Image: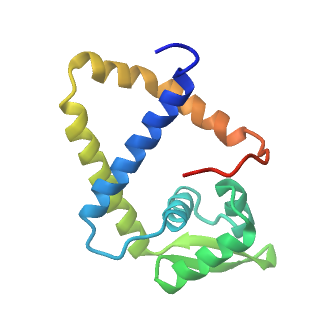
Amino acid sequence: MDDETFPQELADAIVGVQRLLRRRLRAGLTVPRLRGGEAELLRLVGTRPGIGVSEAAKELMLAGNSVSTLVNRLVKEGYLIRETDPADRRAARLRLTEAAEVRLRDWRARRALLVERQVARLDAADREALRAALPALRTLAVQLQQEPEVPQEEDPS
């Protein structure tokens, strides 16, 4: 793999792993599937309880009205609690319900088990290469989060 093809191959590998994780985890669902944005919002609220809707929209890089729609759906489904912000009565703060916490814990446990099983099948050199790549992948994620949004051509995904 040369420097010219590396970025595309890395992106393809990351997308492929993520897609296959989602597919495998969906197979074991006993509850209705969440849409991508719903799952992302629940994970965000789980890591940042009390986050506001506009802050969540910024963090998820979605329009505020899109996040409001997600919030309304998740409140109706019993996964989010929307509370009035005491500092600004016009704003809302979001928290997970117990049902959402259970669902996220179950999802994380099933994901960890799936990855653990597959990583165990790799040879020692590949396992070590993945372990060594984690800091760089985390840095890449932070950089992507900080990347200013620039209008691009339509994404085919």
Dividing the picture into quadrants, the one containing residue 141 is top right
Give the camera-side residue of 84 and 109. Answer: 109
The extreme bottom residue here reads: 76
Q: Is residue 131 above or below residue 58?
A: above
Residue sitting at x 20%, y 21%: 123
Q: Is residue 35 above or below residue 131?
A: below
Q: Which residue corresponds to the image point at 24% horizontal and 63% vertical from the top-left?
A: 28
| In-front residue for pair 121/74 | 121
Quarter of the image holding residue 100? bottom left
Residue at 81 percent across and 75 percent down: it is: 88
Q: Is residue 61 left or right of residue 7?
A: right
Vertical order, 19 against 33 (above or below) = above
Q: Position of residue 91 (x, y in %)?
A: 76, 76
- Which residue is depicted at the point 29% across and 23% down? 127
Task: Name the side, left or right, on which 71 lies relative to 96.
Answer: right
Q: Position of residue 58 (x, y in %)?
A: 72, 57
